[in-house]
Image (cartoon, grey):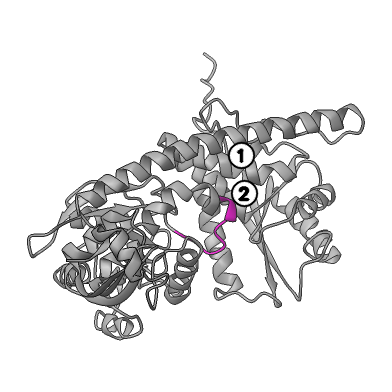
Amino acid sequence: MSPKTTYPTHPPKERAYLVGVDLRKYPSEISLEDSLAELTRLSETAGLEVVGETTQNLETANPVTYIGSGKVEELFSLVEEALADVVIFDNELSPRHQRELEKRLGTHVRVLDRTALILDIFAQHAKSREGILQVELAQNEYRLPRLTRAWTHLERQTGGGGGSAGSVGGVGLRGPGETQLEMDRREIRKRIAFLKDELEKVRAHRQRYRQQRKRARVPLISLVGYTNAGKSTLLNRLTRSDVYVADQLFATLDPTTRRVELPGGYNALITDTVGFIQKLPTQLIAAFQATLEEIAEADLLIHVVDVTHPNAQAQANSVNETLKEIHADHIPTIIALNKIDDLPDPDAASAVVAEFPKAVAISALKGVGFDELMRMIETELFENYTKISVQIPYTEGQLISLFHEQGQVEYIEHTRKGVFIQGQIPGRLLARYSGFQASAPTDKLTDTDLVDDPDLIDD
C-alpha cells in the first residue's frame, strides 16, 4: 500500500523583506528601529513572514530609486539570499520610485510601501458595507497613479461589485498596451466616482442619526488612540459589552456605539472607532471621512494611551496630529493611561500621569482606576462650564434654545444676522458652537428695525 500523500491546509506565507530609510531632512519622533519594529507587526498582521530588514540614512530621498543606487544593488543581493517575494518600504513611495525599484529588483519581486500594507490590512478587517466602501475607495485612489503591473499580494475581493485590488493594470507594453492602461484608469475613475456617491449617502444617514441624538440631548464620547492601545477593551469594561478584542493592529475598524451609565445617574453614548498610527495614509483619512466625523462630532474624547509602550508620548503626538487633520483637536479630552497592570512598578504610573494634562491611570483589562475615570467623564460632560461669546444665525434656532436650556446666558442681543450671546456652556457643547464664535455683535439692529419687526425685541 503506497503511503498517503498529505498536503498543507494553508498556502505558505509570502516572505517579506523590510527597508527603512531615515531622512535627516524630515526627522521623525519615532526612531528608525522602532518604526521598523512597527512595520514588522503590520506585515505579520497582513499575513506575511518577515525574513529580513535593512536601513539607510539619507539627507533626502533619491529622486529615482528613493534609496541610493549602491543600496539598491545591496538590496537585490539581500532579497535573493532571503528568497523574499515582496519588499516593503517603511516610507511612502512615489509611483516613479516603485516602478524603478521593481525594474531593478526583478520581475519576481513586488515592491510595496507602508501605505499599501496598511490599506491591505484595512481590506482584511472591513466587515460592514460602509467599511468595505471606504477601504475600496482608498485603495483605488492609491492605485490609480500606479497602474503598471498587478499586485498579486493585494488580490482580495473588496465587495460591492468592484473587483480585487490586483485585478487591474498589469500592462506595461507600448501601443495597444497603453490603450488598455487608459481603459483601466477610466474604469477606476468611474469606480471612484460611484464609491464617493455611495459614501455620501452613508454620511447623510450618519448626519440624520447625529441630529436625532442631539435632539435627545444624549452626549457622545469617542474613544481615540493609537492602534492596539486598548480602546475596545475599555469600551467593553465601561459598557459591559463584548466588542471584538485582539492583540493585533487595527483589530477594530468599523465604529461601535454603546450606552454607558455615569455615577450621577446620567447616560451617555460611547463610540469606539479605528485606531491611529504614525504615517497614517492620507487616502484613508479622506476615504474614512464618514467614520471619522463620529470623532469630530463628539462632546468628549477619551484618548487611550498604552503607558507601557516605550514610544507612548510619540504615539500620543501622532494621535493629536490626526485629530488636528480631522478638525477634532478642540474637543475636551481626557487622557486614559492604560495597561498600568503591566508596569513593573505600579507607582511609576503616578509619574506618567503628571506628564499628561487631565490624565488618569487605568487598566481597562482589570478595571483599575475606573472610579476616577467615571468622575472625570461626568465632570467634563455636566459640570465644567466654559465662557463663550457667539453670534448664532436665526436659522440655527436649536443652538439658541440649547444655550438657554443648558448654558448660563449673561448677555444677549439680537442683530440683523442672528442672536449674539455671551455666557457659559458645558465644555461638552463647545464643539457645536465652534463655527459661530464672535467677540462682539455684528450688524446691529437700529430702532427702525425694532419698530418694523417687534418680534425681534427680547422679552
Other residues around mark 2 within 10 Å, as few (<14) / some (14–19) / many (≥20)? many
Check disc 1 and report the residue beneath it. 154
* Numbered label tally: 2
Front residue of 188/198: it is 198
Q: Is residue 22 above or below residue 16?
A: below
Q: Are marks 2 and 1 in contact (CB under 8 Å)?
A: yes
* Relative side of 395 to 47, left or right: left
Residue at x 43% of width, y 71% of height: 316
Q: Main secondary structure of the magenta part?
A: loop
Q: Is residue 280 magenta?
A: yes
Farthest-out residue, right: 175
Give the magenta range: 276-283
Q: Is residue 244 above or below residue 344?
A: above
Residue at x 67% of width, y 34% of height: 188
Farthest-out residue, top: 1
**Residue 150, position in %: x, y?**
72, 36
Residue 304, visible in the rendered structure: no
Q: Amino acid at mark 1?
A: Leu
Image disc number at residue 116: 2
Which mark is first along the chain, 1 or 2?
2
Figure quadrant of residue 203: top left
Residue at x 27% of width, y 54% of height: 398
Residue at x 60% of width, y 28% of height: 163
The C terminus, quarter of image: bottom left
Other residues around mark 1 within 10 Å, as few (<14) / some (14–19) / many (≥20)? many
Q: CA distance from mark 2 to mark 1?
A: 9 Å
Q: Is residue 13 magenta?
A: no
Front residue of 362/357: it is 357
Front residue of 425/151: it is 425
